[in-house]
């Protein structure tokens, strides 16, 4: 018996909703749809698409602000390294009580290892050099001054604030997107339930709504996954993505470590058309392929691709 699972991958979900709306437009009156009409389906679909676009924009801004924060941190780190070298000429390389007033934390003269400590130290050095101007260096090649420390602290603080706000906005946009997507899924489930009361289990009108007739045999995935791309990530990690396959409700990712695995081994089952594989042996070549799966069965495997694990 065929089923009508609701897709989790948004391209598939939106396409299913479009098919459902078209079916409601063409046949809603004839089958006497009352609750899940074309207008309601399209309204929920439009809201989900708008929410997804808003989330994508928020993620882009979040990445931009994160990049700006990394730059501010990098600039501060370079300044702190220079300031430490200048101070060491007068206070000594190793920590003593004389270093206390500079603000270097943890009874250490090393540049701090955390972002919080680095930003705070910029502020502390602004105070220190303001009170000890004789310790400043201001040349064409080296600027270690209170003014520079203050400028870097301000840029650092502003970048952190902007990044925090962007992170919060992205989280809110994600929640809004998820809520709109769940509403659309509920609408499609409602349509399936309503059609189940209005149509025979073998009626060809199910297909007009982009749905499987409940009384028909389960339909195998219509396509083999295509357009596989593998992107090396962090050490031992590879990200793989592919094009959506028609009628697929999930995918299985297979790997074969060259000269190690005798055959391909299934390593992940996902509902979206991408997966991140971790724990792979670094510097080794790995072959990857993907199959599409639904309740009717599994497709043939995709064309395999190879990638060297970082």
Image: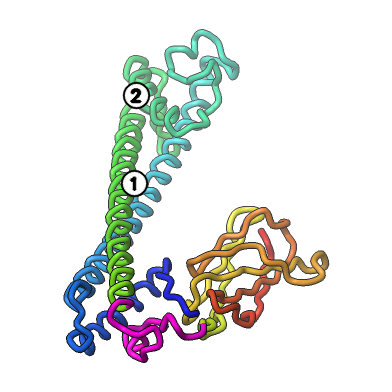
Q: Quadrant of residue 283?
A: bottom right
- Camera-side residue: 252 or 286? 252
Count of numbered badges drawn on the protein:
2
Residue 246 is one of the magenta-drawn residues: no
Q: Secondary structure at mark 1?
A: helix
> Which residue is label 2 attached to?
126
Horizontal side, residue 275 vs residue 34: left or right: right
Badge number at residue 167: 1
Magenta stretch, overall SS: loop
Badge number at residue 99: none
Q: Position of residue 69 (x, y in %)?
A: 38, 44
Above or below 38: residue 151? above
- Please report the residue visible at 37 percent of the width from the left and 21 percent of the height from the top: 124
- Camera-side residue: 5 or 201? 201
Looking at the image, is mark 2 or mark 1 nearer the viewer?
A: 1
Q: Position of residue 242 (x, y in %)?
A: 52, 74
Q: Quadrant of residue 48?
A: bottom left
Residues drawn in magenta: 196-217
Q: Position of residue 65 (x, y in %)?
A: 34, 49
Q: Secondary structure at mark 2?
A: helix
């Amino acid at each position: 018996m065929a089923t009508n699972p609701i897709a989790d991958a948004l391209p598939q979900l939106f396409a299913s909703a479009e098919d459902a709306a078209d079916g409601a437009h063409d046949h809603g009156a004839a089958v006497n749809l009352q609750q899940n009409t074309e207008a309601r389906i399209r309204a929920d679909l439009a809201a989900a698409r708008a929410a997804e676009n808003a989330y994508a924009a928020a993620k882009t801004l979040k990445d931009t602000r994160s990049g700006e924060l990394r730059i501010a941190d990098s600039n501060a780190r370079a300044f702190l390294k220079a300031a430490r070298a200048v101070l060491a000429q007068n206070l000594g390389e190793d920590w003593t009580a004389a270093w206390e007033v500079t603000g270097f934390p943890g009874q250490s003269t090393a540049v701090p290892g955390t972002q919080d400590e680095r930003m705070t130290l910029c502020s502390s050095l602004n105070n220190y050099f303001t009170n000890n101007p004789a310790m400043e260096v201001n040349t064409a090649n080296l600027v270690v001054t209170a003014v520079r420390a203050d400028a870097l602290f301000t840029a650092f603080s502003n970048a952190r604030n902007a990044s925090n706000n962007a992170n919060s906005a992205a989280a809110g946009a994600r929640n809004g997107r998820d809520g709109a997507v769940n509403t659309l899924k509920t609408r499609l489930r409602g349509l399936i339930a309503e059609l189940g009361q209005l149509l025979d289990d073998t009626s060809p009108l199910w297909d007009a709504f982009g749905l499987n007739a409940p009384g028909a045999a389960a339909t195998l995935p219509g396509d083999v996954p295509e357009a596989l791309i593998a992107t090396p990530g962090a050490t031992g990690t590879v990200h793989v993505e592919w094009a959506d396959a028609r009628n697929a409700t999930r995918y299985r990712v297979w790997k074969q470590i060259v000269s190690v695995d005798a055959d391909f081994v299934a390593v992940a089952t996902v509902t979206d058309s991408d997966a991140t594989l971790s724990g792979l042996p670094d510097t080794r070549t790995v072959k990857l392929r993907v199959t599409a799966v639904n309740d009717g069965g599994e497709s043939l495997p995709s064309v395999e691709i190879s990638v060297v694990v970082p």
